[in-house]
Image: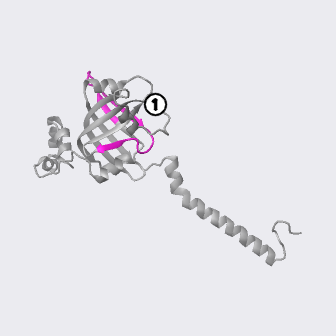
C-alpha cells in the first residue's frame, strides 16, 4: 500500500476505527518515510488505464454529498499524458452536469478502474481540471477517438495525488460480449473441427457398409 494513499485515506476517524477493531498496528507502517509514495504511474498502471473501457468516478458537491458516476467509452479512451496526469474526453450525456458542477466547486476526484476478466482494480485520487472543447481543440482531438460517435464537450484532466491497487478478493469475474467471444473462440473452433470429423466418419462408415451418403450418390 503506497504512503500517498494512506495519508489521504487514514483520517483521524479512520484510524480510530482501526484502533477499535485491531488493525491500527498493521496499517501504521504504511505512513512511514521509507514507504513508496505511490503518487505517479508506472508501466503497469499506464497499461492498465489505457486498456480500460469504463470506470467509476466520485466527486463531492458543495453540500457535502458524494456523487458516483460511471464513465465509459471505447477501450483506450482514458489517456495517460505523463506519469502524473491522465485525461479523457467528456461526452455529452443527459445534461444534468452533476460531476461537472461538483468539480467547479471542489476539484478533488476519486476514480476506480476495474478489470473484471482478470479481477484487478486500481484506485486513483487526484485533482481534476475541466477544459472546454473550444478552449483547447488540440487536446480534445488527442483524447477523442473519431470512430466513436459521441460528441465531446470538454476534457477532464486529472493530476494524480495517489494510486493503490485494490485487493482482488471480492471482485467478480465478468466478461463483455467481445471478451466472452474471445474466451469461447477456441471452443467454437474445436466444435467445428469435431463436427467436420464426425461427418467424415459417418460418410466413411456409410461407404464401408455399402451406403454412400455423399451428395449425388444413387
- Direction bottom: furthest residue: 208
Vertical comparison of 49 with 212: above or below: above
In the picture, measured across the screen, residue 136 lies left or right of residue 209, that is left
Vertical comparison of 143 with 51: above or below: above
For the point 45% across and 25% down, the residue is 94
Location of the C terminus by quadrant is bottom right
- Direction right: furthest residue: 218
Q: Position of residue 105 (x, y in %)?
A: 26, 23
Q: Does residue 104 show up magenta in the picture?
A: no
Q: Callout 1 environment at 10 Å: few (<14), some (14 to 19), or many (20+)? A: few
Using the rendered view, name the quadrant where residue 39 is placed.
top left
Type of colouring = one colour
Q: Position of residue 136 (x, y in %)?
A: 34, 30
- Regarding residue 70, the answer to whether it shows in the image is yes
- Regarding residue 65, the answer to whether it shows in the image is no
Q: Does residue 60 show up magenta in the picture?
A: yes
- Element assignment for label 1: loop
What residue is pinned by disc 1?
Answer: 151
For the point 32% across and 29% down, the residue is 131
Using the rendered view, name the quadrant where residue 216 is placed.
bottom right
Q: Position of residue 208 (x, y in %)?
A: 79, 78
For the point 25% across and 27% down, the residue is 106
Vertical comparison of 208 with 69: above or below: below
Vertical comparison of 108 with 193: above or below: above
In the picture, measured across the screen, residue 2 lies left or right of residue 89, that is left
Tell me how many marks there are.
1
- Direction front: furthest residue: 138
The stretch in magenta equals 57-81
Q: Position of residue 10 (x, y in %)?
A: 17, 40
Amino acid at each position: 500500500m503506497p504512503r500517498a494513499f494512506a495519508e489521504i485515506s487514514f483520517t483521524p476517524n479512520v484510524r480510530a476505527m482501526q484502533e477499535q477493531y485491531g488493525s491500527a498496528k498493521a496499517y501504521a507502517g504504511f505512513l512511514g518515510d521509507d514507504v513508496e509514495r505511490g503518487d505517479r504511474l508506472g508501466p503497469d498502471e499506464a497499461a492498465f488505464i489505457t486498456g480500460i473501457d469504463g470506470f467509476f468516478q466520485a466527486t463531492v458537491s458543495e453540500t457535502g454529498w458524494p456523487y458516483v458516476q460511471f464513465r465509459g467509452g471505447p477501450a483506450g479512451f482514458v489517456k495517460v499524458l505523463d506519469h502524473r496526469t491522465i485525461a479523457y474526453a467528456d461526452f455529452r450525456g443527459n445534461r444534468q452536469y452533476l460531476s461537472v458542477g461538483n468539480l467547479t466547486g471542489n476539484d478533488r476526484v476519486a476514480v476506480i478502474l476495474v478489470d473484471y476478466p482478470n479481477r484487478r482494480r486500481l484506485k486513483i485520487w487526484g485533482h481534476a481540471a475541466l477544459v472546454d472543447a473550444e478552449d483547447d481543440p488540440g487536446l480534445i482531438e488527442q483524447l477523442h477517438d473519431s470512430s466513436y460517435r459521441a460528441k465531446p464537450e470538454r476534457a477532464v484532466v486529472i493530476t494524480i495525488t495517489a494510486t493503490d491497487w485494490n485487493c482482488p478478493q471480492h471482485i467478480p469475474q465478468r466478461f463483455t460480449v467481445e471478451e466472452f467471444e474471445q474466451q469461447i473462440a477456441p471452443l467454437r473452433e474445436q466444435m467445428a473441427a469435431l463436427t467436420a470429423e464426425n461427418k467424415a466418419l459417418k460418410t466413411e462408415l456409410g461407404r464401408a457398409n455399402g451406403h454412400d451418403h455423399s451428395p449425388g450418390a444413387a
